[in-house]
Image (cartoon, rainbow, N blue to C red):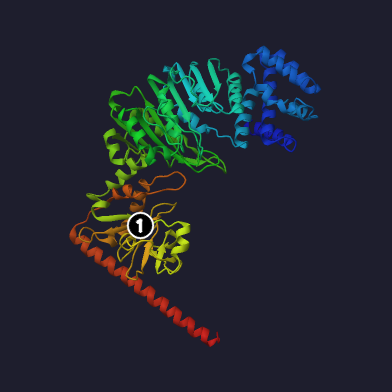
Amino acid sequence: MNEKRELLIYSCFEHLRGVFSQQQAFSITLGVATVKWMEQTNKYAYSSKLISKALLDNAYLESEVERHESEFPEFRGILSVLLSRTFENTGDYLKEIYWRMSDEEDFRELINKTVHFGIRESDFNQTPNSIARFVAKLQDLNIINSFADYCAGVSSIALEIFRQTSHQPYYYAEEINTTIWLISKLLMIVNDVENYEIVNTDVFRKGDINDPKLFDLVVSDIPRISKYNRAFSLNDPRFKYGAPGKGNQEWAFIQNVIYHLNNRGKGIIIGSKGMLVRGYESQIRAAIIKEDLIECVITLPDNLYQGTNIGTEVMILNRNKPAERKGGILFINAHSYRERLNRYQHTLTEEGAERIIRAYYRNIEEEGFSKFIPIEKTKEYDYRLNPVEYIDFESLKNLFDKTVSLDEIAEITRGVSVSKKDMESLEIGGEYYYISIKNIDEGSINYEDATKIRPKSGDWLEKYSIEPEDILITTKGWETKVALVGNDVRDAFFSSNLTRIRVDRRKYNPYILAEFLQSEIGKKMLESIQTGTTITLINNKQLSRMEVPVYSNEVMAEIGQKMEENQKLYEERVRLAEQEYEETRVELMNRLGL
């Protein structure tokens, strides 16, 4: 039946394309489906027959819709917007859509499916079904009397909550997009939700900020907006923990959720990794952490939302934490629990959702999956809230009997940034190779493709040059690369997308460290301290606290020496092979007279 219904919706869209835009085709299909649903609903049956007659006669449709919306205020604006493009003469398109739907038996389900299909086709952001189902299970719904959704979209989460609860708590929602707001209202009507208020407004308007509505549960699926130009003010009481930066709105939404929680309220936020790790928001995170409002942070799989590979994070806030959870935060990493939904996106598996729910409600700690951390420990992580750091980093560290932080055995320096304008001038008379990510290849440095520049200032030679046994590591990008500078080193500077690790030979062996960083454990440990949403980053502060295994002096000396000898032997054989290749090539070219 679902497949047949999807084919019906698709055929309606296809019939309207070419005459109407994608968005208009969606609206018209949804509008006609709504009229058909009303025909089967006692309350609206007579009124809908008048609309249907006008639709089929291609006359007076606009006036009949106006009459209906006046008679039934809950419909105000819905049909008049959905069908607005058909009020003028549109030929037989409406009739065709109407008759195509004649064999449908469940128009409620048809409307729900049309919304899901149409939102996806129109590139609107919609909370995926797997996330809506999951979020609804993070609260005991039978004890709530009210809940709210800021940036509600088409109220996907609310509808899932109503499906899972045995009663109807009061539902309040805000949505800025007018069409989506109207569709959200329509879905309330069609799905028999009675106790609701959905407002078409900007969440950050200055309406009720001095007399806020308070709820038992507040959810917010934060819009994935790459650029946001709103300036937030500290004078706004919603931002008591700090005014978020102009360029990103996530902590504005989070603080708005907190502001609307009653004294036993729970907040659930869906956002990106960035909200957990961005450095310039650390003070806001610190203030909220210190008030002990954060109960749980969950990493979900990547690519759950259509049109983006960005990962999904869920943060649970609680003004009424159980006694055993006070003073701590439960971190859960469910990144691997995904399966392919379609060619565009993944979905959270049922197994993953159930495991998260079980760990959350029981406050379970499982190696590699969940960990309960005292809030004081977050200070060591600069108040970052990335579950991968707290779970994977600590688990990997515990694989070794003893570890030492990188900054205790090495000097860590980020490379020099050269602007395009400076590069043009510094290339003139350049004698130093400028090494970047592209020059790091299979653990070594490829100098041949590097640009040559001269130092911009005298301190470059001390700060940004390289010498044998230095380790270069990428600081951003999808793949972490590591290279050990060999004895064939050339005069060079390293760029700002690389970091130099200069090991103190008295404390550690650089060859062992380089191999560790390139090992599976080392790579996983580096991944656990990476930040960023679209491009991963490792900053020097995070790198400095990375833990590496401690070995005895005897082991370090013996294995380190053998690794060094092996590296030098490799370099010598490569040199000889290149020399032999070039000599043979020259000889053959000479024989050809070239």
Asked whether 377 or 206 is in front, the reply is: 206
> In the rendered view, would you say 42 is above or below 93?
above
Asked whether 164 or 583 is in front, the reply is: 583
Q: Is residue 138 visible?
A: no
Question: Which residue appears at 74% of the width and 16% of the height?
Answer: 49
> In the rendered view, would you say 101 is above or below 488?
above
| Residue located beneath label 1 in the image | 518
What x and y, as percent, mark residue 265?
Answer: 39, 21
Q: Is residue 344 visible?
A: yes
Circle 1: element type: helix
Residue 52 left/right relative to 448: right
What x and y, as percent, mark residue 251?
Answer: 42, 33
Image quadrant where one finds the N terminus: top right
Q: Quadrant of residue 374?
A: top left
Count every numbered label the image shows and give the total: 1
What x and y, as percent, mark residue 495?
Answer: 40, 58
